[in-house]
Image: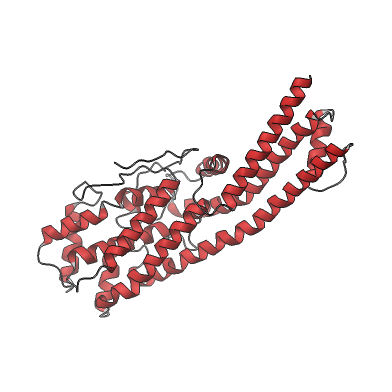
Amino acid sequence: MLVGRIAAVVAGAVLVLWTLSSAIQTVVVPRAAAVALTRLHFRGTRVVFELFTRPTRTYEARDRVLALYAPFTLVLLPAVWAALVAVGFTAIFWGTGIDPLYEAFATSGSSLFTLGFDRPDGWGRVALSFVEAGLGLGIVSLMISYLPTIYSGFRTRESLVGMLEVRAGQPPVPVTLILRYHNIGWLDRLEDDLFDPWERWFVDVEESHTSQGSLAFFRSPTPYRSWITAAGCVLDSAALYTSSIEHERSTKPDLLIRTGFLCLRRISDFYSIPYDPDPAPDDPISITRDEFDGVWQQLADAGVPMKPDRDQAWRDYAGWRVNYDTVLITLASMVDAPYAMWSSDRAPATRHRPPLHRRVRSPR
């Protein structure tokens, strides 16, 4: 019996420390951390939500349900932490001699939520109840600090996503964006007006969406707007601009594309999305040559100055696109993004489900 009580104390302490470590890594540590408990919680909740978001339902119906997924799961997360701490201290109190198990559970719950209706005897047990009460208050404090950080990152992300609708339509289309800039005589201002702010946007999104992984699943205020389709539109616009349109040579679109695909790759690493970290420029992509030629012709017919060698333009475009093609499409599938040209329109029907533990990726 003594061995069983000692084992209960050890197991309870391990459970409490594991839960506390998970909470700190999820909320406090400012980097991408593979937290098995948090992933398990989000995966389990997603399974429930997918019962109401089957592909047979309309996109509007799925979007209404999925808009609740990230906020609902996020609010439940502290409850999971509190429940595990309560279970852990129940085992500890029982192991220190509080019988029966129900009484140990009541002592743990009273201490965790600072209710005070059940106070244990002895200095050691009273000290344990104080520790559990402090952890309960700490979990509440973590939640209070967690939500403002999440919504601050969300607002930062959505500011440019909303502005893109004016420039590229809804859903955003790369050819629409370029044509609108051409029609208003701003094609030469595309780099300063679009590429510069979106380069900073990709840097911000990489930091926020890897340190706070739930942000990827927060949906935009309107159903047909999405951060990932906006990112794909901007990257494709920059790739078309630098590969196909006659303009004064500049490195800004090249830097934007590199910043963008590194951002999407870091987010993909967080969710264990497989991709080739060092693709060859002529590796296959999801965009066909006929699709590229159709866009080329549409731009040329509208009077956009195009480079004379279309074959070389296609090779240059494909050489840029290959760096973000896989991660863009898979992320669009994972968050069930609305239909958009050259991103979610070719996403597989099966959504990517991140594993509980991340794989270590090595360069080719």
Q: Is residue 321 visible?
A: yes
Q: Position of residue 159 (x, y in %)?
A: 46, 69
Name the quadrant of the C terminus: top left
Q: Residue 168 location, x and y as percent? A: 33, 68
| In this picture, residue 112 sits left or right of residue 68 | right
> Residue at position x 23%, y 52% from top?
287
Q: Residue furthest top?
A: 1
Q: Nearer the viewer, residue 275 or 61?
A: 275
Q: Is residue 29 above or below residue 234?
A: above
Q: Nearer the viewer, residue 167 or 153?
A: 153
User: How is the model colour-coded?
Assistant: secondary structure
**Visible in this render: residue 232?**
no
Residue located at (54% from left, 50% from top): 69
Q: Locate residue 352, reporting x and y percent.
A: 42, 42
Q: Which residue is depicted at the point 67% across and 46% down? A: 79
Instruction: Describe residue 347's horizontal placement relative to residue 250 as left or right.
Output: right
Q: Residue at x 41, y 46 (%)?
A: 269
Which residue extends farthest bottom? 185
Q: Nearer the viewer, residue 101 or 333?
A: 101
Give left or right: position of 13 versus 326: right
Q: Quadrant for residue 173, please give it.
A: bottom left
Instruction: Say which quarter of the image contains residue 224.
Output: bottom left
Q: Residue furthest right?
A: 121
Numbered marks: total: 0
- Indicate the quadrant containing the N terminus: top left, top right, bottom left or bottom right: top right
